[in-house]
């Protein structure tokens, strides 16, 4: 590829098309373009350059999006200085004795050979002299995909052997032999009995010590989208168990490096919480809003139209190129094709939602529109979903180096298949009557080999209807309890303001149309 020298650039620049995932060091750097006040966070990758003029240098380069690839490698001042130092390094033909030659051969044999040339490396020519930009310290990022591959290599027999040989599971085996009821043996595998919302007994597979970190990584990283402690514990305890697994999860999630880099916003003290009516019918009320502008994706999209069902908490997000009335209507039609036409929609006072075209669209389909209070985004629960979605997209993009639009389906899958605190069920359970199959479920089935239940279509339909009715009733109960608890907790630090007739107040006048 062509290499251009940029005297105004501090660090090298290369496209994502020429970088493999293993070349990423896990480090990031903030860069700023001329005449631009905003900073951009880019990943760093290890790059190798070779030339007959200066030999070989190993440096680092920032990685830009694949859509900006123009086949050029920009050489910054840092690598240029290394090249100058390499040129000045003298290569003397000194006399070498036989003992010195033997010593050098011995030292050379102890040095690991350099890795084979990868397509991501920019190569000009070969030369034995090497200069390294700096000591590349390995970045301790958990590799969830590699951990999953290691788990899949463990078959059911090997897993049973790991269970028997694990010293930490001896108390569990003793309880199973004593028949105390907490643990049960099915075939050669050890399970723990656990009751769900309906009192049904589920079997949790007991994980040996050697496979616990990989299971934690599977339930927190990759397609699990780096959710918090509560949701990670919920995902883990659906199928797995080991002694002190809750404490291990509480220690693992806060120590996740990627989560610590992104962080999460802290709330400030607010006014007393006012309760809103609980919606009992699924998809009868949908809250919508927009996220953006985001970095331009490979499909030229910069915004996200988000929607969330207020009954099931089922989330949806549609990428759009521009946020105007036409794109909003097209995205809403795509949402309605999955959720159906709601009775009520809540949105803010943005021009795309209050325009004549959008208003007529809502009137045509008999949809009641409720607008959120000005300067009070907390009145729209979808704003809280925005905070979670943006944080998860940042984490997944930082770890995988992919475009945000490519990681969006996996992030939505993670949010739909984990228990929501308000309802006590996952959104998929309330909408479909059962939870969706996720990678941890596939691994569980790979180890346990469960038998498929044989029932007629009529029995399945009636069971599904009864289950969805019970789930909805329990979810409404749960939401009522959670509302009361959250208000009591929220109002502890709230500032209650009371006004009397004649009091002087400061009116905050809006400076924008919305």
Image: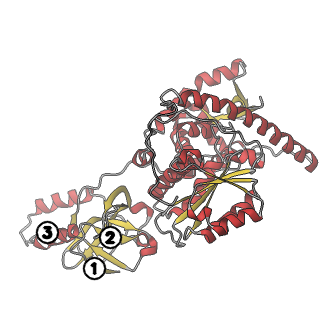
Q: Is residue 484 left or right of residue 299?
A: right
Q: CA distance from mark 1 to mark 3?
A: 19 Å
Expressed as whole percent of the image width and height from the top left, the position of residue 383 reads: 55, 49
User: Above or below — where is 445 with respect to 230?
Assistant: below
Q: Is residue 182 left or right of residue 90?
A: right
Label 3: how many residues lie within 10 Å, few (<14), some (14-19) or many (20+)? few
Q: CA distance from mark 2 to mark 3?
A: 21 Å
- Residue at 48%, 36% (x, y): give it: 270
Marks 1 and 3: which is nearer the front? 1
Expressed as whole percent of the image width and height from the top left, the position of residue 103 reads: 16, 57
Q: Secondary structure at mark 2?
A: strand
Label 2: how many residues lie within 10 Å, few (<14), some (14-19) or many (20+)? many
Q: CA distance from mark 1 to mark 2?
A: 10 Å
Give the image quarter of residue 109.
Answer: bottom left
Q: Secondary structure at mark 1?
A: strand
Q: Which residue is mark 1?
A: 4
Q: Which residue is mark 2?
A: 13
Q: Considering only order in the chain, which callout, 2 or 1, is on the residue closer to the N terminus?
A: 1
Q: Which residue is mark 3?
A: 85
Q: Considering only order in the chain, which callout, 3 or 2, is on the residue closer to the N terminus?
A: 2
């Amino acid at each position: 590829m062509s290499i251009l020298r940029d005297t105004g650039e501090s660090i090298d620049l290369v496209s994502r098309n020429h970088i493999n995932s293993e070349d990423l060091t896990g480090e990031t750097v903030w860069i700023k373009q001329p005449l631009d006040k905003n900073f951009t966070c880019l990943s760093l990758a290890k790059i190798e350059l070779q030339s007959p003029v200066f030999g070989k240098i190993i440096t680092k380069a920032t990685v830009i999006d694949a859509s900006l690839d123009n086949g050029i490698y920009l050489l910054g001042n840092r690598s240029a200085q290394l090249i100058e130092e390499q040129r000045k390094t003298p290569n003397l033909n000194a006399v070498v004795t036989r003992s010195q030659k033997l010593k050098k051969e011995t030292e050379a044999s102890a040095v690991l050979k350099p890795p084979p040339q990868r397509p991501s490396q920019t190569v000009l020519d070969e030369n034995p002299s090497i200069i390294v930009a700096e000591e590349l310290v390995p970045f301790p990022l958990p590799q969830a995909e590699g951990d999953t591959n290691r788990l899949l290599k463990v078959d059911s027999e090997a897993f049973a052997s790991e269970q028997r040989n694990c010293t930490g599971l001896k108390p569990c085996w003793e309880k199973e032999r004593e028949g105390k009821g907490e643990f049960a043996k099915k075939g050669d595998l050890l399970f723990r009995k656990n009751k769900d919302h309906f009192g049904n007994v589920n079997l949790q597979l007991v994980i040996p010590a050697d496979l616990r970190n990989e299971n934690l990584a599977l339930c927190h990283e990759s397609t699990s989208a780096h959710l918090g402690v509560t949701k990670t514990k919920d995902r883990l305890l659906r199928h797995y168990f080991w002694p002190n697994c809750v404490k291990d999860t509480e220690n693992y999630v806060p120590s996740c490096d990627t989560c610590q880099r992104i962080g999460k916003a802290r709330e400030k003290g607010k006014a007393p919480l006012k309760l809103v009516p609980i919606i009992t019918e699924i998809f009868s009320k949908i809250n919508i809003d927009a996220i953006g502008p985001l970095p331009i994706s490979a499909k030229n999209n910069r915004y996200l139209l988000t929607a969330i069902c207020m009954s099931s908490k089922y989330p949806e997000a549609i990428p759009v190129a521009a946020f105007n009335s036409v794109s909003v209507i097209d995205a809403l039609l795509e949402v309605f094709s999955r959720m159906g036409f709601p009775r009520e929609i809540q949105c803010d006072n943005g021009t795309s939602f209050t325009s004549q075209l959008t208003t007529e669209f809502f009137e045509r389909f008999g949809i009641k529109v409720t607008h959120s209070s000005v300067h009070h985004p907390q009145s729209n629960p979808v704003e809280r979903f925005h905070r979670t979605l943006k944080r998860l997209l940042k984490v997944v993009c930082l770890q995988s180096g992919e475009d945000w639009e490519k990681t969006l389906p996996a992030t939505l899958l993670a949010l739909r298949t984990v228990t929501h605190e308000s309802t006590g069920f996952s959104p998929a359970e309330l909408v479909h009557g059962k939870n969706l199959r996720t990678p941890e479920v596939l691994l569980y089935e790979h180890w346990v080999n469960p038998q498929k239940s044989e029932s007629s279509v009529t029995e399945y339909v009636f069971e599904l209807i009864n289950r969805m009715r019970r789930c909805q009733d329990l979810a409404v109960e749960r939401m009522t309890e959670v509302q009361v608890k959250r208000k009591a907790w929220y109002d502890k630090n709230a500032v209650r303001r009371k006004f009397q007739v004649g009091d002087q107040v400061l009116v905050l006048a809006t400076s924008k149309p919305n």
